[in-house]
Amino acid sequence: MVAAVGSLAEASARRRPPLWLASAATAAAWGALYSVGRWVFGFATFPIHEDIRINYVAAQAGLQYGWSTIYDFATLRQLSQVFPAADRSIDATATYISPPLLAWLFVPLTLVPEPAAYLIWTLGALAALIWTWHVVAPYNGLAKLTLLLVALALWPVMQVFYYGQPSVVVVAGVALAWWLIRHDRPIAAGIALALATALKPQVVIMVPVALLVAGHIKPVLGWAAAGLVLAALSAASLGVDGIASYWQALKLVQDDTGHAYFTIAVVFGLGPVTYVLLAIQGIGCLAVARIRRHDLETVFAVGLLGSLMVAFHLHQWDYTNLVLAAWLTLRNSPPLWHRVWLAAGILTMQLLSLGVAVPQLVWDVVWLAILATGASDHARVTVAAVEPTPSPLRTPQGRVSG
């Protein structure tokens, strides 16, 4: 009897996750609950959000007045008149400047009122995040679930959903590109990457460049070919007047220095010093991609990180792509100290939403240096995306090695 009781107790202990993992999962769950609750409260009290409204009226402009008008301030203001007075502004801080593809995606959503479009878009973005987590995030059981909860608990990610930004959809496109390369479909991967680039170029533009310097030619060819097709379709839909309007909108928006606040321009201003530093950081990222060229996960991670490190137009929610970069890196089973640095990034990400950018900028540079060292080379494993990643972390049974 004593032996049986002892055996049951031992089996129960094996089923329990480590205390630190259980604590992390609990904290992440509360953080994710806050994010979901914040979105639900915001939707119930304020169902018209600026970015969704702008994308919505841009799609309406294209349908009603032609696609050359989607960047025209007067047209967007006119279509915004149906919204409450506080939600009608179109100016340098709030106007449509995305490539036409995003407005095209919003065309079906114009069939329903804007609040319903907001809800549908948010649910689609959430599905995209969950799919990305499913195919990319390592580990299994509670450890894998915790990675999703941490992502949802990050305030920049919450703001993606709150404002209706396409960042999560862009990240899903990059994840699909990685998955397709892993499944020996490089041309299709390039097409997926081109679609992600066409949605929000500044947050992924370094990914195809990193792939190129790492020697992954076929995905880059697919990206370039699909990108040319998308560019041609966009130019044809906009026409000469639309392209001129797009250029004027970009110039006006970029004159507002607030759009550069979450870049190194917040420290050095928009001037020669900043542009030189952006170039140095970009070269550094490409050097790491070349050094780690046999490690596809690191090449993608450096491309995502590098896109942020060379950008001069960013907002806090654009740093969502670091979630994918971290998941890819964790698939390589980095050492404990590397994982601790990734965990420290949770704090710097939260500070972004409080308007504090410098810690994140420093964190990015340090992480690039860590990736450059190839510290996880000894533990690198190459796995198919459908298989769990080998790792010293196993849940709910097993142990955690230091």
Image: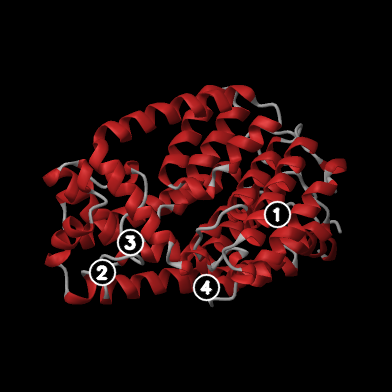
Query: Which tag, 3 or 4, sits closer to the chain's start?
Result: 3
Q: Residue 51 carries which label?
A: 3
Q: Name the residue at 56% across, 41% down.
A: 135
> Circle 3 sits in a helix, a strand or a loop, which is it?
helix
Q: Name the residue under label 1.
A: 395
Label 2 neighbourhood size at 10 Å, few (<14), some (14-19), many (20+)? Answer: some
Q: Name the residue under label 2.
A: 47
Query: Which tag, 1 or 4, sits closer to the chain's start?
Result: 4
Label 4 neighbourhood size at 10 Å, few (<14), some (14-19), many (20+)? Answer: some
Query: Which tag, 3 or 1, sits closer to the chain's start?
Result: 3
Q: Mark 4 points at which residue?
A: 353
Q: In this view, does 290 lie above or below 188?
A: below
Mark pair 1, 4: CA separation: 32 Å
Q: What residue type is labelled 3?
A: Asp
Q: Name the residue at 61% across, 73% down.
A: 27
Q: In front: 104, or 254?
A: 254
**Can residue 332 be seen by looking at this rendering?**
yes
Mark pair 4, 2: CA separation: 21 Å
Label 3 neighbourhood size at 10 Å, few (<14), some (14-19), many (20+)? Answer: some
Q: Which amino acid does label 1 sit on?
A: Thr
Q: Name the residue at 59% across, 70% down.
A: 266
Q: Quadrant of the C terminus?
A: bottom right
